[in-house]
Image (cartoon, helix red, strand yellow):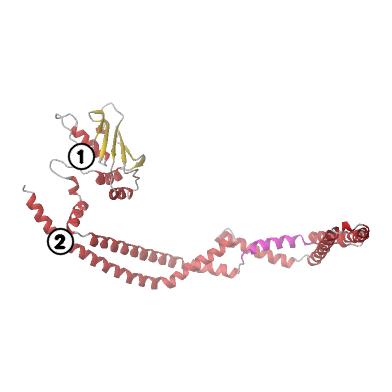
């Protein structure tokens, strides 16, 4: 129910706050006292079109606020379906109307539109005039009354589910047709993409390995010389590290005889000698194997140029280029499967259309039967 209505600067009203209690609330007064203005204020709060002429002369804007409490669970769910929050079963609506006609609205502090206010108002308030009940003018309300009388909840739910199922199939079918047609338009390009990338025979990580190899081939002479210096320093003709390690080994052997406590040093020296020997061997092999090879360097650079062109066209990395190939191939595969999939979807859609017609016929039958009873009942009551 509405628990409070505040109106400020609307027509002849300066500032009024109206608290309302449970049950029937009656406002009485002379003609022109402003009773109708309060109804107009409530209508504006619930989405009626605002005009600048409704602002009180001399004021910059009209401010309207209302609080609704005790909202039941079903209504709360429908309000939340509008994208609005319901805090502890309470909704506070605020609307401001500027003198030039612009308006803004909020529900529980969040901005909203006049259109949403209208939908919210239909859930919260039913305005009755002297000559009409406003909600009865809406086809949705008429159908709700008829279906309630017909006990047609099950049939109505079945129609809704059948309609949504059919709509989903139609959307899926239209999406597949659109994708198929798009692939057909791009088929030649996609085939070119697949052929070009497959022809390159790319390997993941190849660009990085080629970069390392190109750097090595480009500086082969310098690299071989540096590796040889390492090998000579470790195992050269004179003054080498392995020779020094051998001298240390002989000295440690003599030291161990005199002082067995230094025995743990042996493990350290043996490990150092083994590591230096392995390093000397690797450096010598590297020096022997590294040599200038202009033909291989040219081949590597051509390969790198090819990868550079492909990454410029199909992705910034080699992995992106390979992903483009997979995506293009998958799109081409769609051409082979789309027609079969569309036939299957068409059969499912036809079945869904039949199910919807059957559900609608069942609902229509109940509505027709209830409509006669409703008409007779209304005609009995209206004369009274």
In this picture, is 196 found above or below 34?
Answer: below
Left or right: where does residue 234 sit relative to residue 347? right
User: Which residue is outermost to the top?
Assistant: 58
Q: Which numbered tag is attached to residue 197?
A: none
Rendering coords of residue 235 (x, y %): 87, 62
Q: Is residue 159 left or right of residue 83?
A: left
Q: Residue at 25% x, 32% y: name it.
A: 18
Q: Quadrant of residue 34?
A: top left
Q: Is residue 125 above or below residue 290?
A: above
**Residue closer to the observer: 84 or 336:** 84
SS at mark 2 in the image: helix
Give the SS element for disc 1.
loop
Q: What residue did someone put label 1 on?
A: 23
Please state the horizontal and vertical placement of residue 183, each as a whole percent of the image.
44, 66
Identify the residue position indicated by label 2 in the image: 368
Cα separation between marks 2 and 1: 36 Å
The quarter in which the N terminus is drawn is top left
Magenta region, residue range: 204-220
Could you tell me which residue is drawn at 22 percent across and 52 percent down?
A: 140
- Near mark 1 (Cα within 10 A), the count class, few <14, some 14-19 or many ≥20, is few
Q: Which is more N-terminal, label 1 or label 2?
A: 1
Q: Give yes or no for residue 336 being in the magenta stretch.
A: no
Residue 300, given in percent of the width and then of the height, sits at 69, 65
Q: Are marks 2 and 1 in contact (CB under 8 Å)?
A: no
In the image shown, does 74 or 93 lie closer to the viewer? 74
């Amino acid at each position: 129910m509405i628990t409070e209505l505040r109106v400020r600067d609307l027509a002849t009203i300066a500032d009024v706050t109206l608290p309302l209690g449970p049950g029937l609330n009656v406002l009485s007064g002379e003609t022109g006292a402003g009773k109708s203005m309060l109804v107009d204020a409530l209508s504006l709060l619930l989405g009626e079109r605002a005009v600048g002429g409704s602002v009180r002369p001399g004021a910059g804007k009209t401010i309207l606020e209302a609080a609704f409490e005790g909202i039941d669970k079903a209504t709360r769910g429908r309000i939340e379906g509008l994208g609005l929050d319901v805090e502890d079963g309470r909704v506070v609506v605020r609307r401001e109307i500027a003198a030039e006609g612009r308006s803004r609205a909020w529900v529980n502090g969040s901005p909203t539109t006049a259109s949403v206010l209208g939908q919210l108002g239909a859930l919260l308030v039913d305005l009755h005039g002297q000559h009409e009940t406003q909600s009865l003018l809406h086809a949705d309300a008429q159908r709700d009354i008829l279906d309630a009388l017909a006990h047609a909840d099950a049939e109505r739910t079945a129609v809704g589910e059948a309609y949504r199922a059919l709509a989903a199939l139609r959307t899926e079918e239209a999406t597949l047709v659109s994708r198929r047609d798009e692939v057909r338009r791009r088929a030649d390009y996609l085939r070119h993409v697949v052929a070009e990338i497959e022809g390159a025979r790319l390997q993941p990580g190849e660009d990085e390995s080629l970069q390392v190899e190109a750097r090595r081939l480009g500086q082969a002479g310098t690299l071989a010389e540096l590796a040889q210096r390492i090998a000579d320093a470790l195992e050269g003709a004179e003054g080498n590290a392995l020779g020094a390690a051998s001298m240390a080994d002989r000295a440690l052997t003599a030291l161990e005889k005199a002082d067995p406590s230094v025995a743990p040093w042996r493990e350290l020296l043996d490990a150092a000698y083994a590591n230096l020997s392995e390093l000397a061997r690797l450096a010598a092999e590297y020096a022997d194997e590294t040599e200038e090879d202009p033909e291989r360097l040219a081949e590597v650079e051509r390969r790198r140029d090819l990868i550079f062109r492909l990454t410029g066209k199909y992705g910034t990395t080699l992995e992106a280029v390979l992903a483009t190939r997979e995506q293009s191939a998958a799109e081409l595969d769609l051409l082979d499967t789309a027609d079969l999939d569309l036939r299957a979807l068409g059969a499912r859609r036809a079945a869904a259309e039949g199910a919807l017609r059957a559900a609608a016929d069942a609902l229509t039958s109940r509505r027709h039967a209830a409509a006669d009873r409703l008409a007779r009942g209304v005609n009995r009551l209206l004369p009274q």
